[in-house]
Image (spheres, helix red, strand yellow):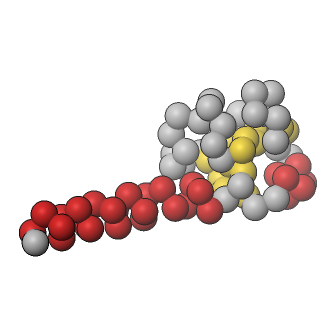
Amino acid sequence: MKKVFVAFLALIALFVFVTPTLASTYLANTKSGKFHFSDCRTIKHPNAAHFVPYESRDACIADGYVPCGVCNP
């Protein structure tokens, strides 16, 4: 029973840390000025402070970000 509880807590922790990244469709990098699909292979640390989540491509562009050349959002 204790193993099940520990596994359950681990699953909750994983969900809490991964959900913010998956909840947004795009991530804008304040350092590079580019925006990416949230699953872009160039993003190594999506929870880093310099990534800002966005729900729409138009919002990224309106805020001055340019599309990533790798994932082409």
Residue at 82 percent across and 59 percent down: it is: 56
Q: Quadrant of residue 23?
A: bottom right
Q: Nearer the viewer, residue 61 or 71?
A: 71
Work out which quarter of the rendered image holds the N terminus and state it.
bottom left
Residue at 68 percent across and 42 percent down: it is: 29
| Number of numbered labels in the structure image | 0
Indicate whether 31 appears above or below 14: above
Q: Is residue 9 visible?
A: yes
> Residue 61 location in percent, x, y?
88, 49
> Residue 43 location in percent, x, y?
59, 35
Identity of the residue furthest to the left in this view? 2
> Residue 10 location in percent, x, y?
27, 60
Horizontal side of residue 30 vs 63, given as left or right: left
Indicate whether 34 appears above or below 23: above
Residue at 72 percent across and 51 percent down: it is: 26
> Residue 54 location in percent, x, y?
73, 58
Q: Is residue 30 visible?
A: no
Indicate whether 16 appears above or below 66: below
Horizontal side of residue 27 vs 17, given as left or right: right
Residue at 26 percent across and 68 percent down: it is: 8
